Image (tube, grey):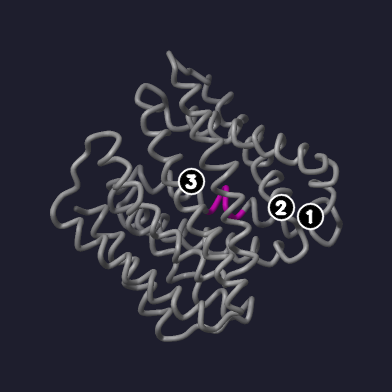
């Protein structure tokens, strides 16, 4: 595969995630966050299981399944649910830009827990991410109802913490495991956790019922297809042609794609502050990966 194709696929992945986030934002108006997360995780698990079986897996040595399962509960059950809750209270472009904090927090956790040491140049990237996210969120807090925005910000920050913790746990658990097998275990554990939460909060049927309505299901299936095929598959395919750092950097351009999509489809008000903050955050993430 030519490197230019890999670059294009990485950008397709970023755009797909932006479209998927916009679809989930629209669905969040009619579907509870726990039900939306549970259905998307169930469908994703089915696709991953089929791919794993086709590849002759899974192969999970030692204690890897337990660590990966824990990372799935933290990152998917907790992190993704908080992400959907944030989407219901903040603009989609603000939530996606907020997730740019995840690489920064992941670095902090890796330094504290794994003894890793980021390159000096990475600190400039961290400063750009923090400044860019701060610019976007300060504008969001002024433009939205203060109480609702603060609640959404709390959910978003909680999602970032859970996602970063899940990433670090996954890194520890997949040292001797393939990425596909590790992803299947993570998604499976996260889905079981979501099912347990739904059962405790009022039952699985109550959580799933809004998702299978004729007015919701086609859009939900479209969102899952876009994220799974355009997001996951395109990103992994790009890794066959370009370096991981380059692919990850291009994938981090998602906030730039979601700005025009959210403005056109959701009617969100996009300011120059939002554009500048999103661009600064993307540049900061690029520096983190390339450093």
Q: Which residue is drawn at the image coordinates 26% and 60% (left, top)?
A: 126
Asked if the residues shown at circle 1 and circle 2 are in contact, with their CB atoms under 8 angstroms apart, the answer is: yes
Q: Which residue is drawn at the image coordinates 58% and 53% (left, top)?
A: 82
How far from the left and from the top, in percent, is residue 116?
Answer: 22, 38
How far from the left and from the top, in percent, is residue 192?
Answer: 66, 32
Label 1 environment density (alpha carbons within 10 Å; few <14, some 14–19, many ≥20): some
Label 2 environment density (alpha carbons within 10 Å; few <14, some 14–19, many ≥20): some
Gap between marks 2 and 3 measured at Cα: 26 Å
Mark 1 or 3 closer to N-term? 3
- Any mark on residue 221, and which? 2
1 or 3: mark nearer the eye: 3
Q: Is residue 227 shown in magenta?
A: yes
Viewer-nearest residue: 148 or 71: 148
Q: Which residue is drawn at the image coordinates 44% and 68% (left, top)?
A: 255
Viewer-nearest residue: 277 or 180: 277
Q: Which residues are magenta?
A: 226-230
Magenta part, dominant SS: helix
Instruction: Give the residue at mark 1.
Output: 217
Where residue 237 sits, quadrant-wise, is top left
Q: Is residue 267 left or right of residue 71?
A: right
How far from the left and from the top, in percent, is residue 141?
Answer: 51, 77
Mark 2 or 3 closer to N-term? 3
- Any mark on residue 207, and which? none
Q: Is residue 206 left or right of residue 243?
A: right
């Amino acid at each position: 595969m030519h490197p230019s194709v890999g670059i294009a696929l990485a950008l397709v992945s970023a755009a797909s995630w932006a479209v998927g986030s916009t679809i989930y934002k629209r669905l969040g108006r009619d579907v509870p966050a726990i039900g939306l997360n549970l259905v998307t995780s169930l469908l994703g698990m089915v696709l991953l299981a089929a791919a794993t079986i086709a590849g002759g897996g899974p192969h999970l040595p030692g204690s890897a399944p337990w660590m990966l399962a824990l990372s799935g509960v933290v990152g998917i059950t907790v992190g993704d649910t908080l992400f959907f809750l944030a989407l219901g209270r903040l603009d989609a472009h603000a939530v996606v830009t907020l997730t740019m904090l995840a690489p920064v927090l992941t670095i902090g956790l890796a330094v504290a827990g794994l003894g890793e040491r980021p390159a000096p140049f990475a600190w400039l990237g961290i400063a750009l991410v923090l400044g860019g996210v701060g610019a976007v969120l300060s504008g969001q807090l002024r433009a939205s109802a203060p109480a609702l925005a603060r609640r959404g910000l709390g959910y978003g920050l909680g999602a970032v913490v859970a996602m970063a913790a899940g990433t670090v746990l996954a890194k520890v658990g997949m040292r001797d495991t393939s990425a596909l097998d590790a992803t299947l275990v993570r998604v499976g554990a996260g889905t079981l956790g979501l099912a347990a939460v739904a059962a405790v909060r009022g039952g699985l049927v109550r959580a799933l019922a809004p998702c299978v309505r004729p007015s919701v299901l086609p859009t939900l299936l479209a969102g899952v297809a876009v994220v799974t095929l355009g997001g996951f598959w395109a990103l992994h395919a790009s890794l066959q042609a370009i370096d991981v750092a380059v692919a990850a950097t291009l994938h981090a351009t998602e906030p730039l794609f979601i700005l025009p999509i959210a403005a056109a489809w959701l009617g969100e008000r996009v300011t120059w502050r939002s554009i500048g903050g999103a661009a600064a955050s993307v540049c900061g993430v690029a520096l983190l990966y390339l450093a």
